[in-house]
Image (cartoon, rainbow, N blue to C red):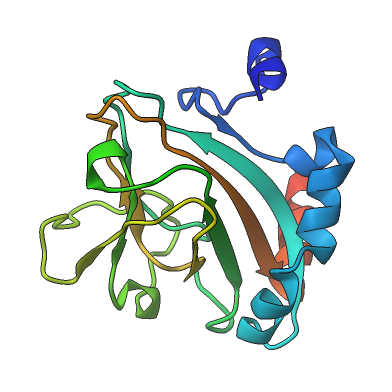
Amino acid sequence: MRRLLDRGDGEGRFRNLLKSLQVHDDWFDMQLREGRHVPLINRLMDGDAIGASAAWFDRPKGERMGIEPHVDAMGKRGSDNTGATIWFALDPVDVGNGCVHYLKGSHKNIYPGETWVTGVNKEAESAFAAQLNPGDAVVHSAHTVHWSGGNKTGLPRRAISYFYLSRSAYYSYQKRRKKK
């Protein structure tokens, strides 16, 4: 991760995020396509999952910046199975070091043309903090609103995620990328 970050392959303002690890390392490519989690993702997505990206997340100790509420796939969805993310904790993760929070039921809403979702009450009763141990994982729909806080502790908060799209969403995404 350090080598890729030093090369400047981070995600712009999110210097502690590296996407598309499968392009840089064959092991991540294999995990994205054939990892032990893939049958679960396929079952949740009715057998229609295509690996889009493997990513590494770091929230180093003292990193105050979190990630604001967002969804992983935007626009109108053709079905509830447009995409899914599985997020694996590499360190103990809790509210103090920036765990992922979810807005329960938000996957039922449509946020057309938006990645960043404004007006989310992070203290609402429907907000859920995913506090995990190393090796634990959470899975969410690409349409679930989620966010994370800053790291107010002296402990690291690292994770690996794999993002999947439905076949139709994947090919639509690839088509849009080629036009750019």
Quadrant placement of the N terminus: top right
Query: Depth check: 152 or 127 in front?
Result: 152
Residue 157 versus residue 48 in the image, above or below? above
| Horizontal side of residue 48 vs 77, given as left or right | right
Kindly indicate the quadrant of the structure image that contains residue 34.
Answer: bottom right
Picture coordinates of residue 103 (x, y %)? 27, 66
Kindly indicate the quadrant of the structure image that contains residue 3.
Answer: top right
Kindly indicate the quadrant of the structure image that contains residue 56.
Answer: top right
Q: Residue at x 11, y 64 (%)?
A: 124
Query: Depth check: 163 or 139 in front?
Result: 139
Picture coordinates of residue 157 (x, y %)? 42, 37
| Horizontal side of residue 150 vs 37, given as left or right | left
| Horizontal side of residue 88 vs 173, given as left or right | left
Quadrant placement of the C terminus: top right
Q: Residue at x 39, y 75 (%)?
A: 107
Picture coordinates of residue 159 (x, y %)? 53, 44
Picture coordinates of residue 175 (x, y %)? 79, 56
The reply to whether residue 175 is visible in this rendering is no
Q: Residue at x 45, y 57 (%)?
A: 113
